Amino acid sequence: MQPQDPFQPSAPQGPPAGFNPQPQQVQPQSASQMKAHKPVKFIVVVVILSLFLIGSLVYGFMMMSSRNDFRDNVEDKITKASEIAVSESKAEQEAEFVEREKEPLKTYSGPSQFGSLVVRYPKTWAAYFDESGKGNTPIDGYLHPNYVPSVNSGISFALRVEVLESAYDRVLDGYTSDAKKGSVTVQPITLEKVPSVAGSRLNGEVEKDKQGSVVLFPLRDKTIKISVLSDQFIKDFNEIILREMSFIP
């Protein structure tokens, strides 16, 4: 017997004699295991059907309650609906009456030396114009529904009409700080009847604690200033005063 070379790998050893490997067999579920899953599925189905049934019952109850409420209170509901309809119709008729009463418009015509200013306004308004030419306001007008309150009454007039001795740029500069603060906005404006003259419209807090609009137009070395300090009269200001106003530059 020759000695084995220690540097030569030994031959792989085979399985021992009599070894016969067999593939592992997967054991099928037993009948008892399969039966254990059936109650779980059954419970899930029962829960789903129960929820559906409860939802249907709740919906049906709500619908029945609604029908019963309508049946029991139908007369009250009809009465209230009729009252609302009558009230809305009355409000619409009153608004239409107020608008009709503004016609025909009244007209103010200013002196020719101050641009022959023409201002048309609702006939339901009263007007007071000072044309004395004294001070820095040669024309100073106040307009308000029914009557003209005192200047010191604190009432916001429906319309104020002024012709100022100051030049347009100077008057407009007086609103510069307010525009920078954002309390007023400034935008260009022209009149339908005087398209050749560009002016400025200021919206916002044009007077302390008063929201409204002021419109300025240059008139030679003077300035036309018209203003409204109440939201109540903005519609008339836009649709009547500005639309009908005119002057000779």
Image (cartoon, rainbow, N blue to C red):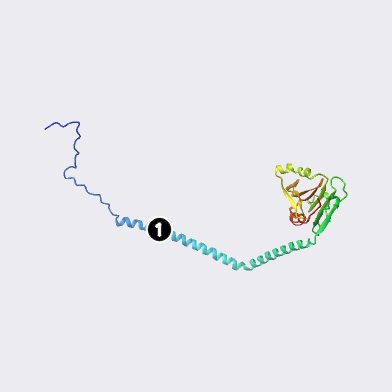
Q: Amino acid at mark 1?
A: Ile
The percent coordinates of residue 205 (x first, y second) are 73, 47
Does any portion of residue 108 appear in the rendered image? yes
Q: Residue at x 62, y 68 (%)?
A: 74
Q: 102 or 193: which is nearer to us?
A: 193
Q: Secondary structure under badge 1? A: helix
Q: Residue at x 65, y 65 (%)?
A: 81
Quadrant, the N terminus? top left
Q: Is residue 210 left or right of residue 39?
A: right
Reply above or below: 169 against 34. Answer: above
Which of the 4 image quarters holds residue 172?
Answer: top right
Reply above or below: 135 against 4. Answer: below
The percent coordinates of residue 76 (x first, y second) are 64, 66
Q: Is residue 2 left or right of residue 29?
A: left
Q: 4 or 50: which is nearer to us?
A: 4
Within-10-Å neighbours for mark 1: few <14, some 14–19, many 20+: few
Q: Residue at x 36, y 58 (%)?
A: 38
Q: 78 or 36: which is nearer to us?
A: 78
The percent coordinates of residue 123 (x first, y second) are 81, 59
Q: Residue at x 71, y 63 (%)?
A: 92
Reply above or below: 54 against 201. Answer: below
